[in-house]
Each structure stands twice: as C-alpha cells, then as structure tokens.
Image (cartoon, rainbow, N blue to C red):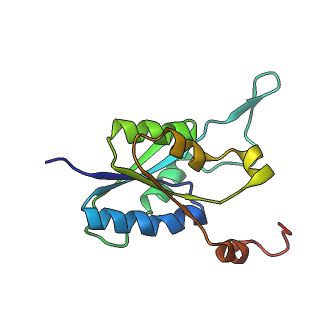
C-alpha cells in the first residue's frame, strides 16, 4: 500500500496558519499523511565573512516546540513534523522529491512588485521547481489589512 503524503511548509506566519486548514482538509479527504515542514535559514554572512544575526532568532528547541504545536484539527489525520536547514524553496522541493509527496500546500503573503523583488518569492520558486502539484493559498486582502499592527503605515 502506497502512503499518500501532503507537504505543508510553514514559516509560522498568519499566511501559513490560513493554509493549514486547506492542507488538513486535503489530507483528510485523501486519507494522506500530513508532513509539516519548517525550514530554518542559516545566518547570513556579510562584509568580511562575519555572521549577521540581526534580531535574535528563536533557538532550535523553541522552533521545534512551535513546529510540533501545529496540529491538524482532525485528530485522525496522520501527521509528521520535520525541521530542516537551508534555502526554504530548495528544501521544500528537496523534501517533496525525497518523500514522493502527492501535493504541496503552502501559504503566501501575496507580496507583489518591488517588495516581492526584494524579498524573493518562496511560493513562486516552489511552484516552478516542485515535482508535484502545488496549492498556494493567499490570505484575503481584508485579512491582511486587519492583521497589520496599528500605526505601521504599511
């Protein structure tokens, strides 16, 4: 018997939280295992090779706890959590290939234009390189507006 697998990458954002509902529903309907993945990016090197950490990042133990806290709403859905390190899009595609997943369900912030150019788009890179269908869930514009901290002007 071949076990079906749905990959749900998360960056712990509200966009990921919103996509989780869809990933869980798809896993439930297809009786698939839900593989929940978080990709931790290595610290950036700059200038003469020094490491730049910027704001303090959560420790790996804290990230594992955050990852394991993500659970499907239906307890019958078989779930596996995995933490990986590297380029998020590259790791998502690598895990999808290695695990022979049937589909990937991920959230996106829906950035466009200059902000997407600066930030890159993990979702776009995954769609282009994935070995399987990809469902990209974008938060509604109303939710994005309501979730924005007051006074940010963004």
Q: Who's the residue at 48% across and 42% down the image?
A: 92
Name the foreground residue: 65 vs 97. Answer: 97
Confirm whether residue 29 shows in the render: yes
Q: Residue at x 34, y 46 (%)?
A: 101
* Left/right of residue 86 with respect to residue 6 in the rendered view: right
Taking 110 as reference, is 5 above or below it?
above
Residues 118 and 91: in front is: 118
Looking at this rendering, what residue extends furthest in the top direction?
48
Q: Position of residue 48 (x, y in %)?
A: 81, 21
Q: Position of residue 71 (x, y in %)?
A: 39, 65
- Image quadrant occupied by the C terminus: bottom right
Q: Residue at x 84, y 68 (%)?
A: 152
Q: Position of residue 116 (x, y in %)?
A: 73, 50
Number of labels in the image equals 0
Percent of width and height locating residue 95: 41, 39
Please state if 31 lies on the left or on the right of 108 as rendered.
left
- Which residue sits at x=44%, y=36%? 94
Asked if one can make out residue 71 in the rendered structure from this viewpoint, the answer is: no
Tell me: 55 left or right of 35. Answer: right
Q: Residue furthest left?
A: 1
Residue 149, picture quadrant: bottom right
């Amino acid at each position: 018997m071949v076990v079906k697998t749905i990959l749900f990458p998360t960056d712990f954002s509200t966009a990921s939280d919103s996509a989780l509902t869809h990933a869980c529903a798809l896993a439930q309907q297809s009786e698939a295992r839900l593989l929940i993945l978080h990709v931790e990016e290595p610290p950036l090197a700059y200038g003469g090779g020094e490491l730049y950490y910027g704001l303090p990042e959560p420790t790996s133990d804290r990230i594992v706890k955050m990852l394991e806290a993500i659970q499907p709403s239906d307890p019958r859905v078989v779930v596996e959590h995995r933490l990986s390190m590297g380029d998020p899009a590259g790791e998502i595609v690598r895990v999808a290939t290695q695990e022979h997943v049937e589909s990937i369900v991920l959230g996106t912030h829906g950035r466009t234009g200059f902000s997407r150019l600066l930030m890159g788009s993990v979702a776009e890179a995954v769609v282009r390189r994935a070995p399987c269908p990809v469902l990209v869930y974008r938060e509604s514009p109303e939710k994005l507006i309501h979730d924005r901290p007051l006074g940010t002007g963004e």
